[in-house]
Every structure is written in structure tokens, then in C-alpha cells.
Amino acid sequence: ADHALLLVDATDAALLEQARRLSDMLPDNVEATLVVNKVDLARVDVTSFAESLSIPVLQISAITGDGLPDLRDHLRSIAGLSQDHDGAFSARRRHVVALTEARDAFERGVSQLLDHRAGELMAEELRLCQESLTAITGAFTSDDLLGKIFGEFCIGK
């Protein structure tokens, strides 16, 4: 990872200390940000604790929403996006082509299922869709999928 987010509960002083130790244990090439949640319920002085760290500290409350805009801005910043970013993303041309092929195969599959009730043709289009996505994500074969299904689900006698 290039950047680690350490999320802790502000109501537990022990977790804050654990976060300090964890940030010290990270490799030198990994930057970190401490995100302290539940600041609305904090039992410890989070601000003075934050000043003692050498990493950025963001204080948030998931319930009240306090600090969430700052967290979003921080995430954009560490991802290299500017504040006025329009939401577009950069992709390699081959990724765009693969995503277009995957979308087209998916849409053909939906059409086969809805228009012709041809589930087997939809399955083939989904296979083609998955094949297009492997150009981006790496190979994941149907045998890999079956292995995952049978490895994670209990199929009784």
C-alpha cells in the first residue's frame, strides 16, 4: 500500500495508543493517516493526542457527519485528485476497450434473457464479459470460479 488509513474509536484510549504503535511499525515508504471516529462521544482529548503524532489525524463522527467532508478531501488529495476534479478518471486505452466490450456483452446477455428467456445464451455473454474484464484484472478462469464456489459454500448431499 502507498497509504494506510488507521481507523480508531475515540472512546477507547487504548486504541489510540495502538494506532500510534501501528503507525510507527509501518514501512518507511507507506504514509499513514489516523482517522478517529466517534469524536462526538470522545472520552479522551483527541486534539492533544493528534498533536503528538507525526502523521495527519482526521477527527470524524460517522453518526453526526462531522469531519466527513475533510476525510473526503483528504482521500482525494492522497489519491492525487484536485478539489475541482470533475469525477473523470484516467485509464489506459486498452482498459476502456475492455470495459466497453464487457458492458456490450452484459447488455447482450440481458437482452437474451429478457427477450428470449435464453439463460444459456446469457451465461455465454457473461463469460465473454468476464473474459473482457480479465484484460484489466488478470486471469480468473471458470475453473477458478468453480473452485471458489465449491471452496466457500457448503453443498450438501
Image (cartoon, helix red, strand yellow):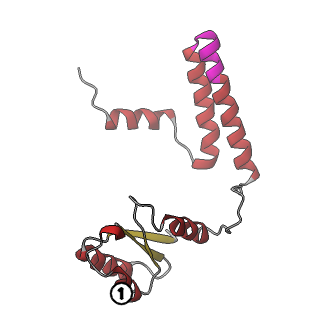
Confirm whether residue 70 shows in the render: yes
Residue 21 left/right relative to 55: left
Give the quadrant of residue 41: bottom left
Give the quadrant of residue 25: bottom left
At which x and y percent is residue 128?
A: 63, 31
Residue for badge 1 = 48
Work out which residue is located at the far right of the displayed protein and give it.
93
**Which residue is drawn at the image coordinates 76% and 51% (left, top)?**
93
Work out which residue is located at the far bottom of the displayed protein and give it.
52
Confirm whether residue 8 shows in the render: no
Q: In the image, is residue 94 part of the stretch drawn in magenta?
A: no
Residue segment shown in magenta: 109-118
Given residues 67 and 127, the one toward you in this image is 67
Q: 10 Å neighbourhood of mark 1: few (<14), some, or many (≥20)?
A: few
Can you say whether 79 is above or below 140 in the image?
below
Q: Amino acid at mark 1?
A: Ser
**Which residue is drawn at the image coordinates 65% and 38% (left, top)?**
132
At which x and y percent is residue 83?
A: 67, 68
At which x and y percent is residue 16?
A: 30, 77
**Which residue is drawn at the image coordinates 39% and 38% (left, top)?**
148
Give the quadrant of residue 91: bottom right
Can you say whether 126 is above or below 33 in the image?
above
